[in-house]
């Protein structure tokens, strides 16, 4: 138990910067949404469409970063400097290549993607303006996610946190000034929010570069006796199933948002306003789950698995406790929503009140699945997690959601309810397989 408590304390030290990092990742969308909200429903809806597209690409980059994170953790646990450098450079090539592909798509087919979502010309123009600027965040984030994954995998999660602490105030101040104007400058509206975010993310990228370069314990020189193109294949083979789990969820969230865009305007605006809060809140249990996966990966690298059984059980308990706290905070948010968004229409406020019970209970249901999924991935069962996500989301939940919205034209409550229903469906297989692998660890 003493060893398990040591793991928990180590996990807490790793998790709280991860939690703040995850919260600040969402800060770009939260800040933009808060600052654009006073401009009216149309700009908010435009941001909802644009950020859905951009967030899909960012989700893929974060997914690759999570795969790199576990590889770095394993290399760090085995004290292999060569494997650390290989994991970094392989991840950087994979993530940068991915970002360039999507940057090309957004540059040449961004208008077509927006047109597929809405036929409102004014709404589409605002969304295209936001995408035309934020598409460059895709390239910068590819680099920052690899640096972040490298730091997190080594247990130095405070370094990315410092980068976000630079980005946050810059984003808030610049976005406010560029949206609303100052002195004789009239302001750029939605376009100003995009420029503020882009400049802030660029400063974070510069900070991470300097932080790694100035760290005497970091040697990113690629080992001369290891051929890169022979190494990147096995690295990709390990990153792919881990990234695919996150990628699948990212696509699913995007499809949900596109389906919600087919609801009436006030309903879609309500979901757009609450989604950044939901994403931010659920990141706290997610950060704990990621810290648990990193700790397990480092233990596997060190070949110290004797106490993992009790550690996994403790991780689940802590994750569920965090989720209950987040649900309580969401309840408080639901009671204060008209003060958070004082300028929204009455119909939008009503829609937010209707879905309040759903987004309050969501983090409790999702937390167990998040912790269990990360534990199974760290133990080398990423394909199993991928199958669970695919079946529950793509075979069951999303088709039903599409049918309810497009065919039966249900209310916002039943449309949004498919998200917590999907999480409930996942709980059964996750619980079964987590218990199975815990028993297997106990026999080793």
Image: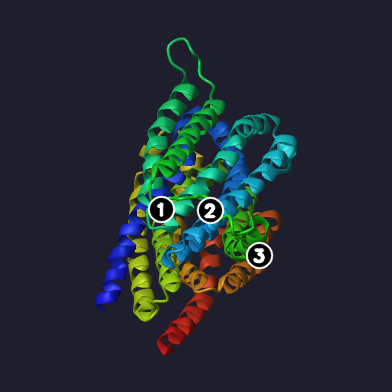
N-term mark: 1 or 2: 2
Among the 4 quarters of the image, the one containing residue 342: top left
What is the total number of numbered labels drawn onto the structure image?
Answer: 3
Name the quarter where the N terminus is drawn. bottom left
Dot 3 lies on which element? Answer: helix
Please tell me the numbered disc located at residue 281: 1
Residue 305 appears left or right of 415:
left
Residue of label 2:
88
N-term mark: 3 or 2: 2
Residue drawn at x 38%, y 80% is 309
| Residue occupying the far left of the picture | 2
Please tell me the numbered disc located at residue 130: none
Q: Position of residue 269 (x, y in %)?
A: 54, 41
Residue of label 3:
394
Q: Residues within 10 Å of mark 2 (few under 14, many from 20)?
A: many
Label 3–label 2 contact, CB within 8 A: no
């Amino acid at each position: 138990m003493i060893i398990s408590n040591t793991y928990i304390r180590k996990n807490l030290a790793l998790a709280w910067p991860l939690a703040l990092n995850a919260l600040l990742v969402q800060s770009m969308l939260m800040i933009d949404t808060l600052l654009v909200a006073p401009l009216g429903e149309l700009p908010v809806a435009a941001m909802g469409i644009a950020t859905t597209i951009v967030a899909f690409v960012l989700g893929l980059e974060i997914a690759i970063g999570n795969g790199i994170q576990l590889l770095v953790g394993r290399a760090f646990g085995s004290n292999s400097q060569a494997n650390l450098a290989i994991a970094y450079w392989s991840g950087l090539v994979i993530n940068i290549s991915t970002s360039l592909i999507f940057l090309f798509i957004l540059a040449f087919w961004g208008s077509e993607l927006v047109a597929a979502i809405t036929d409102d010309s004014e709404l589409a123009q605002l969304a295209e303006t936001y995408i035309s600027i934020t598409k460059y965040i895709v390239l910068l984030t590819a680099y920052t996610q690899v640096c972040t994954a490298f730091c997190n995998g080594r247990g130095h999660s405070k370094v990315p946190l410092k980068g976000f602490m630079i980005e946050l105030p810059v984003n808030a101040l610049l976005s406010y000034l560029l949206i609303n104007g100052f002195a004789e400058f009239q302001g750029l509206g939605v376009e100003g929010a995009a420029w503020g975010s882009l400049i802030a993310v660029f400063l974070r990228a510069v900070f991470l570069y300097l932080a790694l370069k100035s760290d005497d314990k970091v040697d990113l020189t690629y080992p001369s006796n290891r051929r890169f193109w022979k190494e990147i294949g096995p690295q990709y083979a390990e990153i792919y199933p881990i990234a695919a789990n996150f990628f699948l969820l990212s696509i699913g969230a995007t499809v949900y948002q596109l389906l919600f865009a087919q609801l009436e305007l006030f309903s879609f605006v309500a979901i757009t306003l609450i989604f950044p809060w939901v994403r931010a809140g659920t990141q706290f249990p997610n950060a704990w789950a990621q810290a648990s996966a990193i700790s397990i990966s480092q233990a596997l690298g060190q070949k110290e698995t004797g106490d993992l059984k009790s550690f996994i059980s403790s991780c689940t308990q802590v994750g569920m406790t965090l989720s209950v706290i987040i649900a309580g905070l969401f309840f408080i948010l639901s009671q204060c929503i008209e003060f958070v968004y004082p300028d929204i229409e009455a119909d939008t406020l009503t829609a937010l009140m209707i879905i309040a019970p759903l987004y309050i209970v969501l983090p409790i249901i999702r937390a167990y699945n998040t912790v269990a999924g990360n534990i199974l991935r760290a133990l080398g069962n990423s394909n199993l997690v991928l199958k669970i996500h695919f079946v529950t989301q793509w075979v069951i939940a999303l088709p039903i959601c599409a049918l309810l919205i497009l065919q039966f034209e249900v209310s916002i409550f039943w449309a949004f309810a498919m998200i917590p229903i999907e999480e409930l469906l996942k709980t059964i297989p996750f619980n079964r397989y987590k218990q199975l692998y815990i028993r297997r660890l106990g026999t080793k």
